Image (spheres, coloured by chain):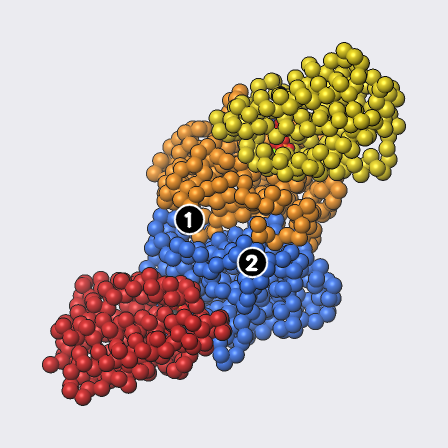
Chain colours: A orange, B yellow, C blue, D red
């Protein structure tokens, strides 16, 4: 394992220190428990939008803290959900009297810890669980679909709604509408290496890829021969389109995401293919996001996320945002 | 002959040692069907437990168990943190403020722990989780001769068997469930850690 | 080699198509010769700021085309400088009557092709050559120092000057001032794989790193054992500080850059260490940039760039910019 | 017996074939001390040369050479594009509008090519570049018996030796110079491609 770290035990803490140094105007980082909050204290009368999860998916979630997006993020250890203490602390630090909406990715650990936090918190709290990964069968025989790329879009859109003053019930309803309209799927060309493990999370031969991976180095649906970019994009896009399903005439946001180690030149290439495939089906790409926004450490690979848009979502997507990783209109 | 607060503390120290010794094994088990952190998570949690027990040892078994619960809840994270945390919290509540636990109290604590895990995680036997180790352990923890050590030893044996029984199972709860059929052929890490913890408690009780 | 591509021969072209699809409002991509220009045609009376170089360093340069930064970028094949035709075409497409400033990274191929373009162009053209890499000895016995991370800062600052209406001579003078004040150095933990080659550009053992690498997979100053993050950051920062030299009381911009494959969590960690080391020496970090902005495909590693700031540079750095990769104030 | 435009075209076709055959070798040489693209760059350039010659074959040697020059300049990129482009541009200018080149004209073209490379790249013999192959080639291209084939063959032999002479050199120009002492022990890719091109021209001339 070669990584730019001092000690696997202190990676998250050390990185948070660097994040604070890099964004003194945007963020206030608290340690013990670890919470990243918007600089400037709680915004009075505004719903606090809070998320969190294991570290190693940067910029998710800390990179999305700031005006128009998250009020706070709770970073767990690498690939491990945060504890309920962190979430309780985040709520206490950011509730400006309008309550808090917790955005929880659907993993057992995240769900249980956020659930305990909601029970313990002194504020009015609602939770939504995002489960956009079509690679997982949503049935009685699984823990349900995972929360993946859709989380980024959800945090942006709901963050904008909270910023404009929507109340807790409205934010929750909007979040549920986004969750109902977003689907994702990912693939890996290489495995990531978790610092405290030191070896790859799964094995892939030189000509193989893993389709349907999550964001924690957990293996996917199946291993197949790594083909061309066009084959890869189709392998992700078709299950997504079938699932909602998306239909001709739908207006969508297309999010082409790198798992971390895939360079931008490949990502743009894949994005171009996805745009073409959607155009061929009469689906109208109205907004797009391309880059490494929800990653799996140094994993090479990509994911696609498609959100069916309505006018309100477009307006909220376009609303000003000022965070370390997403910024526009300000 | 029951368990004092000091005995419970000793049992937890033993458990912490066992967790540290088996950290890599638990990581490897979780790497096969999960995300490779179960050993690391428990190690972090029990290291914190040790230092809080050192700093300020509580004076009743229930307080010890509660300190363990809140420490695990605030340091472990993942699925195991709330699950083990809830288990210890319920166990603490089950034993009241007795200064010494007799065998029935220990059995009640185990039953309460299982109930807590099930309440939080909604898993049933056969889902390939820690419930597959804890359920037979509770059943086996009979107090025929009134010996806590004997009850815990029976529980630990049953838990070990329960953990082994998870190998062929297809996971239906937790992260391993994403793998579907590919989860079969591996022992569940949480079931394994439950068996390890109970064995450590039993051995500590035998030495007390 | 596993990459998200269809054909090594068409990687750049295919990626440009995706880039156009991703940023229809910002960019107009022309093929044959390949040139990425700002949407909306030449800005009358504004100096055109043009750069370019081999592809594989994304977002450099195409990702910096847009308001307040580059007028055009000329993407060569992967790691190969563009041809003079591309540069001539870029000048013709963007010169709004105030001439063009060419920003050239100091590599023989880039220098020769931009030089030919300047000879052939019909506009008034000035060229500046950036050579900020302290890893290379600047002597008669080398082709001189390479242009690396400082290029990003130079393009931002000079782009802002052109945007506010500075004339060609003023833009050139400012560029030379930035070049004189900026220093960089990089290291690699893994090699990149050039698509048309298919195997790693250099070999590194599991416990080695290469210090002083460039951005083209060319080996560096020396191979050493990969140490801790603190050792890595010192190994980059000390030669930089000694070179200018930077002194206590200097105001600087610190740019912590990923070579592509290094995840953000490690990059923030390294950034935090660099900030601390600078604080220890009394050097004042007034602005910072952290992320993958000048990369080497999927190479894992990082570079540090330090720019000594004056008031004008700070003002121009803070000026609005709207490009695919850098955006603020708009 | 001189070279017509058709002969020059044939020589360039032969050169294009050789470049394609040696693409991987040139990439490997450049991988060792540069950036692994020299073979790919020349292959791209000569493939474009072929298709432009096919589309519209010029009718004088100078026009052929000029077409090659502009094609290489617009398709090769890197250091080699402007250098080889300038070489062919100067060679074109050196042979005027003759419809057939005699041996002295070919020798003049070679000298002009070398001058062009040196004017653009400022390298001298010993810097470990294509100049180390081209310089001895120009010297060796004597027209004793007036045979273009013989002159080119002597030039090609000298270029091959010149290319070999770059192996122990420490590079002082181009990308390889960044390596300092580590550049010694490898042949310069540009010197190797110069030798290959001259050998292809010589063989084509012998067959004409
Ligand atoms: N719903 C559940 N009920 C009971 N136990 C569960 C449940 N989900 C997961 N577990 C247990 O948790 C263990 C995993 O713990 P850990 O690896 O620490 O957390 P995570 O899965 O969040 O990474 C599994 O091996 C399993 O025994
Ligand atoms: N200044 C120079 N003068 C003459 N030849 C040079 C000079 N710099 C580089 N070269 C030649 O160019 C070759 C490299 O060409 P190529 O790999 O295509 O370009 P790049 O170095 O830009 O990747 C070198 O092997 C060398 O022979
Ligand atoms: Mg986990
Ligand atoms: Mg786990
Ligand atoms: Mg090159
Ligand atoms: Mg080269």
x and y percentages locating residue C253 in the rendered image: 64, 63
Q: Nearer the viewer, residue B101 or A294?
A: B101
Task: Left or right? Give the position of A1 relative to A40.
Answer: left
Q: Is residue C59 above or below residue D92?
A: above
Secondary structure state at the residue bearing disc 1:
loop
Q: Secondary structure at mark 2?
A: strand
B155 in relation to D203, above or below = above
The residue beneath circle 2 is: C208
Quarter-of-image position of residue B47 = top right
Q: Nearer the viewer, residue C21 or C291?
A: C291
Residue A92, quarter of the rendered image: top right
Residue D99 at what x, y percent from top left?
A: 14, 79
Determine the residue positioned at 73% across, 62% down.
Answer: C279
Say which of A242 and C145 sits in front. Answer: C145
Residue shown at 62%/36% (left/top)? B25
Chain hosting mark 1: C
- In the picture as drawn, the residue positioned furthest to the front comes out as B207
Residue at the far bottom: name it.
D144
Q: Is residue B1 left or right of residue B183?
A: right
Q: Is residue C133 left or right of residue D85?
A: right
Q: Say whether disc 1 or disc 2 marks the residue closer to the N-terminus.
A: 1
User: Mark 1 and 2 residues: CB-CB less than 8 Å, in contact?
Assistant: no
Q: In this figure, which residue is indicated by the disc labeled 1? A: C3
């Amino acid at each position: 394992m070669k990584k730019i770290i001092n000690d696997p035990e202190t990676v998250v803490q050390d990185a948070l220190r660097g994040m604070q140094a890099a964004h003194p105007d945007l963020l206030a980082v608290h340690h013990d428990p670890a919470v990243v909050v918007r600089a400037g204290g709680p915004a009075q009368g505004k719903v606090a939008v809070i998320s969190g999860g294991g570290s190693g998916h940067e910029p998710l979630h800390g990179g999305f803290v700031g005006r128009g997006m998250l009020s706070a993020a709770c970073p767990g250890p690498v690939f491990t959900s945060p504890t309920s203490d962190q979430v309780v602390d985040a709520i206490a630090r950011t509730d400006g009297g309008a309550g808090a909406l917790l955005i929880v990715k659907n993993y057992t650990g995240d769900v249980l810890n956020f659930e305990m936090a909601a029970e313990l918190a002194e504020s009015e709290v609602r939770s939504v669980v995002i489960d956009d990964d079509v690679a997982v069968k949503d049935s009685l025989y699984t823990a349900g679909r995972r929360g993946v790329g859709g989380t980024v879009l959800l945090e942006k859109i709901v963050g904008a709604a909270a910023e404009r003053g929507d109340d807790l019930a409205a934010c929750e309803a909007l979040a549920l509408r986004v969750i109902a309209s977003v689907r994702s799927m990912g693939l890996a060309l290489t495995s990531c290496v978790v610092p405290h493990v030191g070896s790859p999370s799964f094995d892939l031969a030189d000509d193989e890829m893993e389709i349907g991976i999550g964001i924690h180095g957990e293996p996917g649906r199946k291993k197949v021969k790594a083909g061309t970019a066009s084959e890869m994009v189709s392998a992700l896009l078709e299950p997504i389109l079938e699932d909602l399903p998306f239909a001709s005439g739908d207006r969508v946001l297309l999010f082409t995401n790198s798992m971390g180690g895939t360079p931008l030149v490949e990502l743009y290439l894949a994005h171009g293919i996805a745009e073409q495939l959607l155009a061929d089906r009469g689906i109208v790409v109205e907004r797009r996001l391309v880059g490494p926004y929800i990653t799996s450490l140094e994993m090479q690979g990509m994911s696609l996320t498609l959100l069916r848009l309505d006018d309100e979502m477009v307006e909220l997507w376009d609303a000003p945002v000022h965070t370390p990783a997403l910024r526009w209109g300000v | 002959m029951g368990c004092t607060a000091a005995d419970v503390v000793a049992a937890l120290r033993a458990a912490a040692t066992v967790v540290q010794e088996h950290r890599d094994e638990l990581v490897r088990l979780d790497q096969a069907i999960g995300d490779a952190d179960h050993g690391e998570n428990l190690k972090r949690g029990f290291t914190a437990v040790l230092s809080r027990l050192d700093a300020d040892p509580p004076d009743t078994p229930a307080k010890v168990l509660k300190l363990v619960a809140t420490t695990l809840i605030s340091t472990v994270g993942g699925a195991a943190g709330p699950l083990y945390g809830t288990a210890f919290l319920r166990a603490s509540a089950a034993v009241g403020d007795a200064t010494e636990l007799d065998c029935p109290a220990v059995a009640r604590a185990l039953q309460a722990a299982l109930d807590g895990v099930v309440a939080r995680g909604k898993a049933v036997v056969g889902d390939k989780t820690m419930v597959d180790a804890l359920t037979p352990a509770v059943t086996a923890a009979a107090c025929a001769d009134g010996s806590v050590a004997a009850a815990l030893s029976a529980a630990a044996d049953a838990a070990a068997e329960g953990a082994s029984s998870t190998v062929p199972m297809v996971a239906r709860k937790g992260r391993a469930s994403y793998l579907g059929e590919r989860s079969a052929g591996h022992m569940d890490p949480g079931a394994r850690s439950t068996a390890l913890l109970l064995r450590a408690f039993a051995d500590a009780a035998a030495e007390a």
